[in-house]
Amino acid sequence: MGGPGSGNWYRSLGSKSTVEGSLTVAVRDIRNRLHHGSSGTFSWTWRGGHTSSIGYFVTRTFDVPTVTLHYRWGGKEVVRVPVRMTTTPTQFGGRRWWFTCPLSVRGVPCNRRVGKLHLPSGARLFGCRRCHNLTYRSCQESHQAERVFGRLLGCDAETARLIGSRWGRKGR
């Protein structure tokens, strides 16, 4: 009974939070509403039926829009997060919109150009995947076999992956 691959495998996944477990705002959801004074609401419905929503409004300074996200955190505190927008040129003369990550990590502003901002469980502010140290669920699932193999061999997952890749080569 038991053993690798049986039972609640998801409990053995890495301790990192995932993108899929976070609230996510994407540029594609807002790019057609970047004119001064526009506003709206994003809503999510969780599996248990619980809903979450955030509002936003757009201001423009020197033709550069800022999207301010506003929501309640912890049921009490009203949080307002101004997010600067930036563009890059596209191949045929258009422009692609990006969020600029509003977070600072250890006192250093991130300012990464990103297409999505995330709010993981327990976090107070929206930010990029790197600032929140988020991973994708599929990455955790795909590396689970390496972790189990590593535990059986008494080594870390990276060493197990290297051993497995060499083992899997045939005639090379």
Image (cartoon, helix red, strand yellow):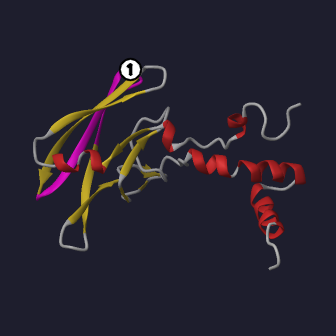
The answer to whether residue 29 is above or below residue 100 is above
Report whether residue 72 is seen: no
Q: Few, some or many C-alpha atoms within 10 Å of disc 1 (few <14, some 14-19, many ≥20)?
A: few
Does 71 lie within the magenta span? yes
Of 41 and 62, the residue lying toward us: 41
Of 20 and 170, the residue lying toward us: 170
Residue at image coords 28%, 34%: 70
| Magenta-drawn segment | 62-81
Which residue position holds label 1?
75
Judged from the image, the secondary structure of the residue bearing numbered disc 1 is loop
Percent x, y for residue 48? 48, 20
Left or right: where does residue 112 sit relative to residue 30? right
The answer to whether residue 60 is above or below residue 124 is below
Residue at image coords 21%, 65%: 95
Percent x, y for residue 4? 82, 41
Does 92 lie within the magenta span? no
Left or right: where does residue 50 sit relative to residue 82? right
Name which quarter of the figure residue 40 lies in: top left
Predominant secondary structure in magenta?
strand
